[in-house]
């Protein structure tokens, strides 16, 4: 609540992004709990398997926060060039293009957007993160000699096929985040 309150203290209109997930719902709940006059926005992709607009609408109703679903088409109106100019070096965030499009769509209503980005990462909300934690716990129990041994035999394990994932798991377990 303190983190949300700090970000609500703005001299420009504030909005929030609301997906069907827990992290953005908590942010929107915090906004409502603090009594702020903020609207939530959701990108709707009707007919797509990943569309969360129904869940977001139900969450907004439950929380009691004003909510609007944005229908963004697949038109590229030069936005890729704008994105490249904004990030002049490799930037490994798959949602950057979508965030730029959403920001454009809500610009008239909100200059600042609060999101739940990072919540799933911090609290191991994805199965991948839980697997990485298990690998780190396993790595703490592996003898130090295992790393050099693995590096010696690693070339014998195929890069493709059934053993590919096992190879990556051992790489991560014995080499840590750098191997990931």
Image (spheres, grey):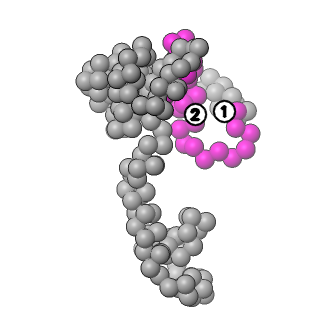
Q: Is 33 left or right of 99, judged from the image as shown?
A: left
Q: Of residues 113 and 52, which is closer to you in this image?
A: 113
> What residue is rendered at 47% in x and 75% in y?
140
Mark 1 vs 2, N-terminal side = 1
Magenta stretch contains residue 21:
no
Residue 134 shows which numbered tag?
none
Question: In this view of the protein, can residue 26 be seen by the observer?
Answer: yes
Q: Of residues 66 and 19, which is closer to you in this image?
A: 66
- Residue at the disc numbered 1: 83
Q: CA separation, marks 1 and 2?
A: 7 Å
Quadrant of the image containing the C terminus: bottom right
Percent x, y of residue 169: 47, 71
Look at the image and give the residue range highlighted in magenta.
86-115
Q: Is 90 left or right of 25, judged from the image as shown?
A: right
> What residue is rendered at 40% in x and 53% in y?
124
Q: Of residues 6 and 129, which is closer to you in this image?
A: 6
- Circle 1 packing at 10 Å, graded few (<14), some (14-19), many (20+), is some
Quadrant of the image containing the N terminus: top left
139 vs 36: above or below: below
> What residue is rendered at 74% in x and 39% in y?
88
- Residue at the disc numbered 2: 97
- Circle 2 packing at 10 Å, graded few (<14), some (14-19), many (20+), is some
Percent x, y of residue 51: 36, 33
Percent x, y of residue 63: 29, 23
> What residue is rendered at 73% in x and 33% in y?
85
Q: Is 59 left or right of 11, judged from the image as shown?
A: left
């Amino acid at each position: 609540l303190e983190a949300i309150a700090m970000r609500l203290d703005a001299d420009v209109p504030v909005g929030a992004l609301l997906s069907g997930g827990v992290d953005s719902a908590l942010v929107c709940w915090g906004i409502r709990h603090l009594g702020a006059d903020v609207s939530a926005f959701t990108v709707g992709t009707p007919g797509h398997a990943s569309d969360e607009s129904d869940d977001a609408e139900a969450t907004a109703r439950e929380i009691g926060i004003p909510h609007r679903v944005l229908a963004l088409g697949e038109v590229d109106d030069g936005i890729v060039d704008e994105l490249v100019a904004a990030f002049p070096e490799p930037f490994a965030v798959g949602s950057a293009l979508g965030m730029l499009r959403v920001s454009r769509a809500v610009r008239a209503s909100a200059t600042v957007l609060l999101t739940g980005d990072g919540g799933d990462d911090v609290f191991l909300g994805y199965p991948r993160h839980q697997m990485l934690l298990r690998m780190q716990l396993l790595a703490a129990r592996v003898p130090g000699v295992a790393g050099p041994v693995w590096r010696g035999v690693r070339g014998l394990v195929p890069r493709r096929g059934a053993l590919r994932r096992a190879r990556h798991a051992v790489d991560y377990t014995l080499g840590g985040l750098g191997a990931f």
